[in-house]
Image: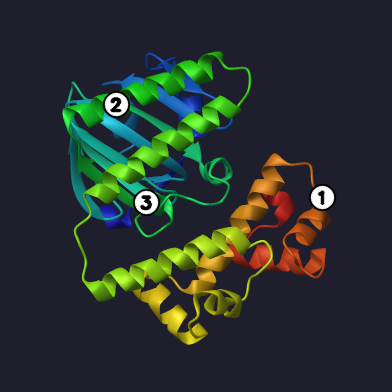
């Protein structure tokens, strides 16, 4: 059967937790909270859970992990990969994964964070690795790098299990994602001078969007800040990322809106005002056009 034709099954942290709970098949040292989930030494219990459905999964969270033993072969965003001991991996929201084979000794340590929480932790300024250019990534690390990352995950687990507030947890998640960014960036191949200039302009654009999307939704503002024309900036953004500049701006605005909808008690009118919309009606139409849902639908 053609894997491209299979209907992906939505798999969130919550649905994973519910499945584990119903089947009483929790891995050792598994911790789930509303804001994130972490598992230490997730092993071959994955085999009956993941392979039983024989379908792709649509993952809607940020997920990061390190393979401790064994291997898993699967299709990620229509491309086949094998991850094995010594590999670290990350995926971003809306990634489609279809497992094909999992070794009996497969063991993984990792975490998952919902998209709105991930953006909130990083105050809307994501590390370059997670700004949307790459949907997923796999790389080998040295034994020392792997051990350090494993220690970070274990420390996060202990902090989450014992801390009475979210501050320490969020700071530790931010530290782990920063280290991921450092590891992946260190292995990126060098680029030509022109490509480096384009990438630098794109990074500057993303940085400005993350800082000013609440007040500015017009490309002219960002082009003026970068000292280029709107047309030129739009061309560079599309060439580097494959996504239009307007889509990046809209994505940032919607993310900011979702964070406020889910993590504050602000009314829709207050959120519209905070995001510099002329009125709540205009904001609601904008939100519905981009997401297909009303702001109230995303409240829960």
Q: Nearer the viewer, mark 1 or mark 3?
A: 3
Could you say which quadrant of the image residue 47 lies in? Answer: top left
- Cα separation, mark 1 vs mark 3, equals 33 Å
Check disc 2 and report the residue beneath it: 148
N-terminal of the pair, mark 1 or mark 3, is 3
Marks 2 and 3: in contact by CB < 8 Å? no
Marks 2 and 1: in contact by CB < 8 Å? no
292 to the left or right of 235: right
Q: Secondary structure at mark 3?
A: helix
The image's mark for residue 267 is 1
Check disc 3 and report the residue beneath it: 129
- Cα separation, mark 1 vs mark 2, equals 43 Å
Residue drawn at (41%, 31%), measured in percent from left and top? 111
N-terminal of the pair, mark 3 or mark 2, is 3
Q: Where 259 falls versus 207 (above or below)?
A: above
18 to the left or right of 136: right
Out of 258 and 19, give the one closest to the viewer: 258
Residue drawn at (54%, 32%), measured in percent from left and top? 170
Q: Where 21 falls versus 49 (above or below)?
A: above
């Amino acid at each position: 059967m053609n894997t491209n034709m299979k209907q992906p099954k939505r798999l969130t942290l919550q649905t994973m937790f519910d499945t584990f709970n119903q089947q009483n098949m929790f891995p050792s040292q598994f911790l789930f909270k509303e804001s994130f989930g972490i598992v230490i030494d997730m092993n071959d219990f994955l085999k009956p859970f993941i392979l039983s459905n024989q379908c792709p999964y649509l993952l809607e969270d940020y997920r990061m992990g390190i393979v401790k033993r064994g291997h898993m072969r699967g299709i990620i965003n229509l491309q086949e990969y094998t991850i094995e001991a010594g590999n670290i991996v990350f995926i971003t929201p809306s990634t489609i994964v279809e497992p094909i084979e999992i070794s009996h000794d497969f063991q993984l340590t990792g975490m998952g964070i919902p998209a709105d929480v991930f953006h909130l932790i990083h105050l809307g300024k994501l590390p370059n690795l997670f700004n949307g250019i790459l949907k997923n990534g796999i790389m080998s690390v040295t034994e020392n790098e792997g051990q350090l990352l494993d220690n970070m995950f274990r420390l996060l687990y202990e902090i989450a299990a014992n801390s009475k507030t979210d501050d320490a947890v969020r700071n530790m998640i931010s530290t782990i994602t920063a280290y991921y960014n450092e590891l992946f960036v260190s292995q990126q191949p060098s680029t030509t001078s022109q490509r480096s200039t384009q990438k630098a302009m794109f990074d500057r654009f993303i940085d400005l969007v993350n800082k000013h999307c609440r007040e500015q939704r017009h490309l002219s503002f960002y082009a003026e800040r970068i000292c280029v024309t709107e047309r030129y900036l739009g061309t560079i953004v599309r060439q580097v990322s494959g996504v239009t500049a307007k889509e990046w701006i809209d994505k940032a605005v919607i993310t900011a809106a979702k964070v406020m909808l889910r993590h504050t008690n602000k009314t829709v009118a207050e959120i519209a005002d905070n995001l510099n919309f002329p009125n709540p009606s205009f904001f609601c139409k904008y939100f519905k056009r981009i997401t297909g849902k009303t702001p109230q639908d995303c409240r829960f």
